[in-house]
Amino acid sequence: MRTAVRNDRRLPASMIRLFFHDCFVNSRNAFPNRNSIRGMNVVETIKSAVEAACNATVSCADILALATRDGVVLSGGPSWTVPLGRRDARTASQNAANSNLPGPSSSLSALISSFANQGLNLRDLVALSGAHTFGVARCATFRSRIYNDANIEPVFARSTQANCPQAFDNAYYRNLLSRRGLLHSDQELFNNGSADSIVRSYAASSFVFFRDFAAAMVKMGNISPLTGSNGEIRRVCSRVN
């Protein structure tokens, strides 16, 4: 991961997206994520090395979880102990993906409901959304917001460009306080609603954000894991055995 991140500073953000969608639906074919498959080549490279050393033992799900954690650490973020033993899904459901995953135009109530369906609370939602502190979004996901949304700081709307923050920090929350959330679903977290106080606490303290983000990542990794005889250990991560 160290070499991969050195070669591509956007990689850690891509790994988090993959991990998020893998945990929510055990699938990397989800509609809101269809153009975010960057990083799978790194998972496949790690998987090939692991298979050569000890075949049919370590799942792609566990490799993705570990690589995601390491990518966050290499970007200056927190570390956490990754629970291991997850197995890989044998199927992928497009319908489940589209119904379970919140999109970039989601309201706060829709976000809360989507996360609650996975056993995640409001604090988990706000903490995990902080992963948007780095990486880059496709223009299609925020075009409507910067041209049509009134809940955005005007100068920021005019000056938004396709740059790519590389550090994992709490700048995301400071931007929300200034009405500079890039996606509509981002700014919904700070819009005179129930998440406002959490956003303020994370904007004020990177320690609190890092602590809660690490805990939420562990919690998300434990969403309906496939263990025991369920699922499989894929030989190649991009397809079932």
Image: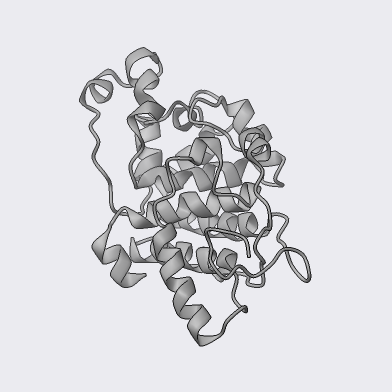
Name the residue rendered at 58%, 28% in the picture: 108
* Front-lying residue, 112 or 229: 229
Q: Is any part of residue 111 visible from this angle?
A: yes
Scheme of image coloration:
one colour
State whether residue 178 is above or below residue 26.
above
Name the residue rendered at 27%, 58% in the picture: 8
Where's residue 91, x and y in %? 68, 52
* Front-lying residue, 82 or 130: 82
Look at the image and tell me in which quarter the C terminus lies: bottom right
State left or right for residue 163 relative to residue 126: left
* Front-lying residue, 3 or 186: 3
Where's residue 136, x and y in %? 33, 42
Figure quadrant of residue 43: bottom left
State left or right for residue 52 relative to residue 110: left
State whether residue 62 is above or below residue 168.
below
Check the image and name the residue furthest to the front.
Answer: 241
Q: How many labels does the image show?
A: 0
State whether residue 21 is above or below residue 160.
below
Check the image and name the residue furthest to the right.
Answer: 229
Look at the image and tell me in which quarter the N terminus lies: bottom left
State left or right for residue 165 relative to residue 84: left
Name the residue rendered at 56%, 41% in the picture: 30
Where's residue 138, x and y in %? 35, 34
State whether residue 19 is above or below residue 74.
above
Figure quadrant of residue 73: bottom left
Name the residue rendered at 52%, 47% in the picture: 127
Q: Is any part of residue 209 visible from this angle?
A: no
Where's residue 7, x and y in %? 24, 63
